[in-house]
Amino acid sequence: MTKVEDPILTAWERTRANNRDRAAIFDSQGKVARTFLEIEDRARQFADELEAIASGQVVAIQIGNHPDWPSLFLACLRKRVVVLPLEQTISEQQRTSAFQLCHVAGVIAAAVSGGSVVEILPMGIAVPTISWSENPPVLLKFTSGTTGAPRAIRFRSEQLLADCRNICETMAITDRDLNFGVIPISHSYGFSSLLTPLIVRGVSLALSNDRIPRAVIDGLAASRATVFPGMPVFYQSFCAMNEPPPLPDLRLCISAGALLPTETARAFGEKFRREIHSFYGASECGGICYVREPQPIPGFVGEAMSDVTLELVDPEVSKSLIRVRSRAVADGYFPTPNEDKLGHGIFVPDDLLQKTARGYRIVGRSSDLINVAGKKVHPAEVEAEILRCEGVQEVIVFGRESERRNQEVAACVVAKGLTEGELLAHCRVRLSSWQVPRRIYFVEAIPVNERGKTSRRELALRYPVNRLA
């Protein structure tokens, strides 16, 4: 049987031939860390070191935003070893769960003696052989999913290549750009926005592991990056800074991972004279929507990406699930498929969207419905009403367990000049009794996790019913 060359490796050969000694990776201060030729040399070295890992087995890579990421991924593609990216900050319990679920045969981690060196460590124990059938993956994305049960998502190179093409063509990113990489490469957003554009299209990359906002903006200035794939939390912090450095080279600001508040977009535009383009995607399918022309509309995520087709599951209602069709959609979940949600080139996210003349708005999530004594409450409806109260800047509504009512409504609010009683009075006039929050927590900023996401499930644990604060 003729060996079929991996399409990402084929693309890399073109990239390498066209660039060779050009700088591929910089550090956050603009110093060259790898040329394209050096990436290839290290990829061949790592391929030799992967001899102990058999074709089809899974290797976990947990090295942060390390300059050896491209070389390691290329080496695994050549050895037909499946890559499982893991964030450095995951708990030991999550790490163990990922190892067991994906039958990990080896780990690539930063050496204890120094973060600049990576080590390839076989597990030292026998792991079950996985039968991948006719479509073996090259990448597994580990996720807890909407149910909270851990699982992985299967990707072939063709799907990763399609997502890279969709992103670069939709956002007009070329090999003349320099990406600033502070979002984790181990996360879907970082992998598709940073790693594959470098390998496939020669888009150079400045890498940073320092997520402190001041360090991020200083790195943007020092590296002279032209593209910043960021998250709302970064832009919010930039807006609050005194005397931030000028960013004359930065031409494209992208925000993903969570909805971008319109107030943040407005403040950033006034302070830095640049627009933020919201980007909506999912681990299962890569990019979905992109805001080409920013609009002051809450939850607005723009139009479908290049080569992505969207359709409303229920077009007769004001907000509906969508079906995403594209060549970037993953093959399915592992180890237990769910073809009603993911498969055959179609993915159905949990987000509820509303179609407008200018594009799509996210107006909630189907899995976020709060069951208050048998009555269903959608957080987005309560959030919309709270935002109408003068002085409210941001809000997130969530459901938490209640002994008498199954669940009850609570909210975290960023506001000025308001008391909880005044805001509750506003809600009682405009909402049904079961929609009114039982408690409102005033916060300096809406709580987010390390990925910049706000999890209603995590907020319910953080603010249980018996919490007194």
Image: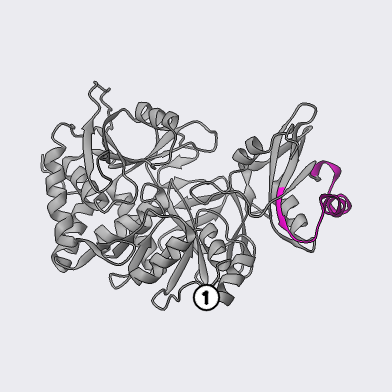
Question: What residue is rendered at 75% in x and 50% in y?
Answer: 382
According to the image, label 1 marks what residue? 272
First to last magenta residue range: 412-435
Give yes or no for residue 425 being in the magenta stretch: yes
Question: What residue is rendered at 47% in x and 64% in y?
Answer: 254
Q: Amino acid at mark 1?
A: Phe
Q: Is residue 440 left or right of residue 58?
A: right
Question: What residue is rendered at 28% in x and 48% in y?
Answer: 157
Instruction: Between residue 81 and residue 261, name the one nearer to us.
Output: 261
Count of numbered circles on the image: 1
Q: Is residue 397 left or right of residue 66?
A: right
- Inspect this view and state whether residue 277 appears: yes
Image quadrant occupied by the N terminus = top left
Whole-percent x and y of residue 318?
68, 55
Q: Residues within 10 Å of mark 1 (few under 14, many from 20)?
A: some
Give yes or no for residue 336 being in the magenta stretch: no
The way the protein has been coloured in the rendering is: one colour
